[in-house]
């Protein structure tokens, strides 16, 4: 998932740096960064540096905006739109560093800074979007564009900036502008609180085991990792399990203790729903109400209408139809999978009805029965450093780029590694950071973001600083970090976002913005290479012996490629429908979240053995990661990536003509042109949904 944190995404629309030189030079934000490729000097940045830097950044951008407004010349693209695009570079630099670390390496002090600065940033952003005189100049350029000789990208930027101001409230009267300011301010605080509550819930839950019998079924690696966690907490001789994904999923898949599986699963799914100080029910209810109020103020009946206007899907009705079309074959497949598992349950001495916390355990039983394959067979071949090399190798074979580790570039945590990325001729392309292990200071999940985006205004080419974050299994005292097959796909997924950002070649910051229902194409297509036999043989090597993964195991992986696809697609589709249901609400009355959620799940006809991938109180994508009315994007983009990958399968996995066309027409373009037109330039036609059904065995 490509992610930029809350308000910092808006501020990143604007980027020209001309900051005061008489400020305290001990604050690294007030000096030029004489670092390799002007990367952030993380070791020098202290918590006390952020607030003064934010304040200075807002002050500077206000001056830059005032200069645009006070320009006595007739508004032109150059003196208005381009000047707007250049504004706020200092503020963007501060925001990107703070926003990245707030999720990847946070603490209570940083969260307090975020609480303080959120209202300031909200007001600052509203001051820009609600300025009548600034909007008059933008509108003048927009209305007169027919007489201008603009490039395709400039037309896209002009339209996007104009719409952003309209959607930001520029056409509202003074009373409604004041209402919008209050909504935005309150929303900013709720977004921050919701996300932090989920992070704290992840860190809060602990399952302590002091009896060896309760470890039945768990792998030696899981047991050892749990023992080391317990020892770190001062309880040697016990075992500690958390709900971080690297711990949770192996536990659900392997533990023979059904009551403990249920306890772990419920703890994960009920994050934010424990009726304590971290409860997210009232927070999300208020968020939904505020979103409806905002949509109504801006002339939209539903919040989903507002959001989808700038997506590929365009309307809620189109999204619902897409999800409905996916539901029937997906639900039918999931029912068959559940029936297969129920048969295994019924053969046992302790008969019961299969429940959601049983799915991983019994699906592994089915997988072993059908394919003689389980996660522990493949994990020894997926040592994390080899997997990373495998991802780098794929990119190298496709586009000739190289990743060279740099020890001289500062990092924000010892787990982080840094690579310089170069073209085949040695030309610098960008910097790529990886941060792959869980810790209490990090939000759960995986994402890609940037400390600096690529841009090329006024002949000043700026290269990107991209970072990938994950929460994969950590090394233990006698084993390196070994990944599951799902972890491998996730790593390749985020790497795909990274490649997209590295290859981007646009002039203006706004042109780098890609709708969520298209931005997942580059990430999801990269997953396709991960399990290709040719690629596996290159990176999948046994961590002890160095043995290349045997063909017999590759054959099992290939034969099981459609396994559990009904479940995986159904839980995702269910979460997407839940998201849409919230955002087609028309009443501003605050919802009873548990009641609404229950009704939504009942209405969609979800089988009882499956819950949505996320329940409301921990659905961080739609609460604070900007995917509200947009969680369907992963499935929508899956149509694109399945169809696009068929082009490589038809011509060759590393066919250079196909790879270069994909780079030129998709990866480099960002959001600088009509997205469907870009896709058609690559593929020669619009995508075919049959490719998705085929790729998941649902046809």
Image (spheres, rainbow, N blue to C red):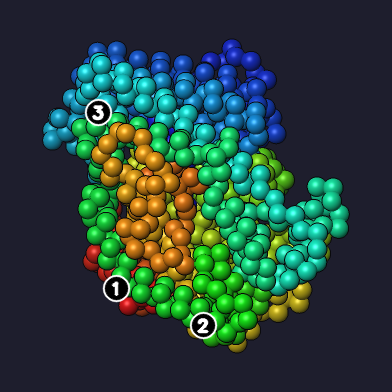
Tags 3 and 2 touching, CB below 8 Å: no
Tell me: 408 left or right of 152.
right
The residue at which mark 2 appears reads as: 343
Tell me: 549 left or right of 13.
right
Cα separation, mark 1 vs mark 2, equals 31 Å
Question: Residue drawn at (45%, 79%), measured in percent from left and top?
Answer: 339
The residue at which mark 3 appears reads as: 297
- Out of 154 and 497, give the one closest to the viewer: 497
Q: Earlier in the sequence, mark 3 or mark 2?
A: 3
Question: Residue drawn at (53%, 43%), measured in percent from left and top?
Answer: 272
The residue at which mark 1 appears reads as: 690
- For disc 3, the neighbor class at 10 Å (few under 14, some 14 to 19, many from 20) is some
Image coords of residue 387 (percent x, y): 62, 65
Question: Is residue 220 at all visible to an observer of this figure?
Answer: yes
**Which mark lies nearer to you, 1 or 2?**
2
Question: Residue drawn at (44%, 65%), measured in percent from left and top?
Answer: 608
Residue 46 falls in image quadrant: top right
Say which element carries label 1. helix
């Amino acid at each position: 998932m490509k992610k930029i944190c809350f308000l910092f995404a808006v501020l990143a629309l604007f980027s020209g740096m001309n900051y005061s030189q008489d400020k305290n030079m001990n604050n690294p934000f007030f000096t030029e960064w004489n670092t390799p490729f002007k990367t952030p000097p993380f070791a020098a940045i202290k918590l006390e540096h952020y607030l003064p830097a934010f304040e200075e950044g807002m002050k500077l951008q206000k001056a830059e905006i005032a200069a645009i407004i006070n320009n006595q010349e007739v508004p032109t693209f150059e003196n208005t739109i381009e000047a707007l695009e250049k504004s706020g570079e200092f503020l963007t630099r501060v925001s990107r560093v703070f926003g990245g670390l707030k999720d990847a390496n946070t603490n209570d002090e940083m969260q307090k800074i975020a609480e303080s600065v959120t209202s300031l940033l909200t007001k600052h952003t509203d001051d820009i979007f609600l300025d009548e005189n600034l909007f008059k100049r933008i509108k003048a350029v927009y209305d007169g564009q027919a007489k201008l000789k603009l490039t395709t990208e400039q037309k896209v930027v002009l339209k996007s900036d104009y719409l952003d101001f309209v959607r930001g409230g520029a056409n509202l009267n003074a009373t409604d502008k004041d209402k919008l300011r209050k909504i935005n301010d309150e929303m900013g605080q709720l977004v921050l609180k919701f996300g932090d509550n989920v992070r704290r819930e992840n860190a809060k839950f602990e399952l302590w085991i002091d009896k060896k019998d309760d470890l039945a079924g768990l792998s030696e690696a899981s047991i050892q990792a749990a023992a080391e966690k317990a020892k770190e907490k001062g309880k040697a001789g016990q075992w500690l399990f958390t709900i971080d994904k690297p711990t949770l999923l192996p536990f659900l898949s392997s533990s023979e203790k059904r009551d403990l599986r249920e306890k772990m699963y419920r703890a994960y799914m009920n994050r934010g729903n424990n009726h304590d100080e971290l409860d997210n029910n009232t927070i999300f209810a208020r968020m939904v109400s505020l979103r409806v109020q905002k949509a109504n103020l801006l002339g939209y009946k539903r919040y989903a209408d507002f959001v989808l206007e700038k997506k590929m899907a365009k309307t809620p009705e189109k999204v619902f139809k897409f999800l409905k079309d996916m539901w029937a074959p997906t639900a039918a497949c999931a029912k068959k999978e559940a029936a297969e598992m129920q048969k295994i349950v019924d053969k046992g001495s302790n008969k019961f009805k299969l429940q959601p916390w049983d799915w991983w355990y019994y699906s592994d039983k089915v997988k072993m029965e059908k394919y003689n394959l389980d996660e522990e067979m493949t994990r020894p071949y997926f040592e994390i450093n080899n997997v990373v090399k495998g991802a780098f190798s794929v990119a190298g074979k496709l586009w000739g780029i190289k990743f060279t580790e740099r020890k001289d570039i500062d990092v924000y945590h010892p787990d982080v590694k840094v690579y310089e990325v170069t073209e085949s001729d040695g030309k610098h392309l960008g910097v790529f950071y990886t941060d792959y292990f869980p810790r209490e200071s990090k939000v759960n999940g995986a994402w890609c973001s940037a400390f600096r985006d690529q841009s090329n205004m006024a002949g000043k080419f700026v290269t990107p600083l991209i970072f990938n974050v994950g929460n994969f299994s950590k090394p233990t005292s006698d084993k390196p970090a070994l990944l599951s097959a799902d972890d491998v796909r996730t790593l390749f997924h985020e790497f795909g976002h990274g490649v997209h950002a590295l290859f981007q070649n646009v002039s203006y910051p706004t042109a780098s913005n890609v709708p969520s229902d298209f931005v997942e194409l580059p990430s999801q297509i990269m997953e396709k290479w991960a399990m290709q036999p040719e690629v596996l043989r290159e990176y999948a090597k046994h961590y002890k012996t160095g043995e290349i993964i045997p063909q017999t195991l590759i054959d099992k992986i290939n034969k099981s490629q459609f396994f559990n696809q009904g479940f995986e697609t159904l839980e995702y589709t269910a979460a997407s429908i839940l998201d849409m249901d919230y955002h087609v609400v028309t009443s501003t009355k605050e919802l009873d979240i548990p009641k609404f959620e229950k009704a939504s799940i009942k209405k969609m006809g979800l089988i009882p053995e499956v819950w949505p991938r996320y329940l409301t109180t921990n659905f961080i994508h739609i609460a604070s990661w900007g995917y509200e009315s947009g969680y369907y994007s992963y499935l929508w983009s899956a149509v694109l990536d399945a169809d696009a990958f068929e082009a490589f399968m038809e011509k060759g996995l590393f066919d250079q003509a196909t790879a270069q066309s994909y780079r030129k027409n998709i990866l480099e373009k960002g959001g600088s042109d009509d997205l469907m037109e870009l896709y058609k330039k690559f593929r020669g036609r619009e995508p075919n949904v049959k490719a998705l059904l085929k790729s998941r065995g649902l046809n």
